[in-house]
């Protein structure tokens, strides 16, 4: 339940929190195990690794002893396993094998996932896609004429290597503004880092930005902020690793997101009959 889930912050501070999460996971496993029909929605690559960027290279059922990232062993993997000895994929792959539908958030997301972790799927599983729902109103309200925009380039989120931080800094330097967090070297290069802001403040920044930058080095499943920036009227500076761009639709059109949601519900209900 939302009330139960709200007890668990992103970072766990005590062993008691680990134990609570374990009980929550076991209850979820039982509920999913008893379901006659199962649809699995994923927004990342959670069956492959609990870390967003699959450090093992995407091989499922890989033991922790083989993990290329030692820091994984001490942290998030422990939350996701009963004994701390197996990767997250060991547990989630069992549900995916039973699923009737698996939903992805972009053609790129689907392609990247299948190339790394989909070999064990049954042939009769429906692989569907939907564009995540966006609330366009704040971003439409903050649109400005291009001539009135005073931010040359904007990034929103965790400005990390996987999000293309180095290339963005090389291309835009001190003209770049980051709304989110960044490593110290970014500010040393003259980039203005604002920290995290509210949705309303982010929309205001997007309305002031001429360009929105996202140049990830990994296959970003969708990139919600790219869609929001497009609605706000920014020129997009991206690459082939942004899932939102792989849809081939006009991301500036707010109706795109509503139509996708309606289509998703129709396919979902029909497939679970």
Image: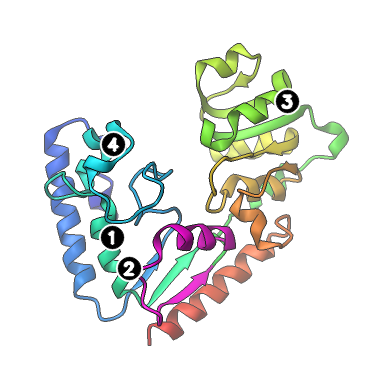
Disc 1 residue crowd, few under 14, some 14–19, many 20+, Cα 10 Å? some
For the residues bearing labels 2 and 4, Cβ distance under 8 angstroms: no
Disc 3 residue crowd, few under 14, some 14–19, many 20+, Cα 10 Å? some
The residue that appears at 16% across and 40% down in the rendered structure is 18
Q: Position of residue 145 (x, y in %)?
A: 85, 40
- Quadrant where the N terminus sits is bottom left
The residue that appears at 57% across and 23% down in the rendered structure is 194
Residue range corresponding to the magenta coloring: 105-129
Residue position for label 4: 72
Residue reaching furthest right? 147
Relative to residue 44, is residue 240 drawn left or right?
right
Residue position for label 2: 96
Q: Position of residue 146 (x, y in %)?
A: 85, 38
**Separation (CA) of disc 1 from disc 3:** 41 Å
Tell which circle, 2 or 4, labels the residue nearer the N-terminal end: 4
Residue 106: tell me if it is visible: yes
Q: Is 49 located above or below residue 75 in the figure?
A: below
Kindly identify which numbered label has been placed on residue 172.
3
Residue position for label 1: 92
């Amino acid at each position: 339940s939302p009330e139960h889930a709200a007890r668990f912050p992103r970072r766990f501070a005590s062993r008691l929190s680990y134990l609570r999460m374990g009980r929550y996971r076991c209850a979820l496993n039982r509920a999913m195990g008893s379901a006659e029909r199962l649809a699995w929605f994923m927004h990342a690559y959670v069956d492959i690794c609990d870390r967003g960027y699959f450090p093992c290279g995407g091989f499922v059922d890989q033991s922790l002893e083989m993990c290329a990232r030692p820091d994984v062993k001490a942290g998030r993997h422990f939350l996701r396993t009963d004994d701390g000895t197996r990767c997250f994929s060991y547990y989630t792959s069992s549900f995916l094998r039973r699923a009737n539908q698996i939903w992805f958030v972009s053609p790129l997301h689907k392609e990247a996932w299948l190339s790394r972790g989909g070999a064990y799927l049954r042939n009769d599983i429906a692989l569907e896609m939907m564009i995540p729902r966006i609330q366009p109103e704040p971003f439409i309200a903050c649109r400005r004429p291009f001539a009135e925009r005073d931010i040359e380039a904007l990034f929103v989120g965790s400005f990390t290597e996987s999000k293309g931080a180095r290339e963005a800094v090389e291309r835009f330097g001190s003209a770049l503004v980051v709304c989110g967090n960044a490593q110290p070297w970014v500010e040393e290069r003259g980039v203005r880092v604002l920290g995290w802001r509210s949705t309303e403040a982010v929309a205001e920044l997007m309305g002031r930005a001429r360009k929105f930058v996202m140049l990830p080095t990994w296959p970003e499943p969708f990139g919600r902020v790219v869609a929001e920036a497009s609605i706000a009227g920014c020129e997009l500076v991206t690459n082939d690793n942004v899932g939102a761009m792989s849809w081939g639709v006009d991301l500036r059109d707010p109706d795109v997101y509503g139509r996708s949601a309606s289509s998703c519900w129709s396919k979902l209900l029909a497939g679970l009959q």
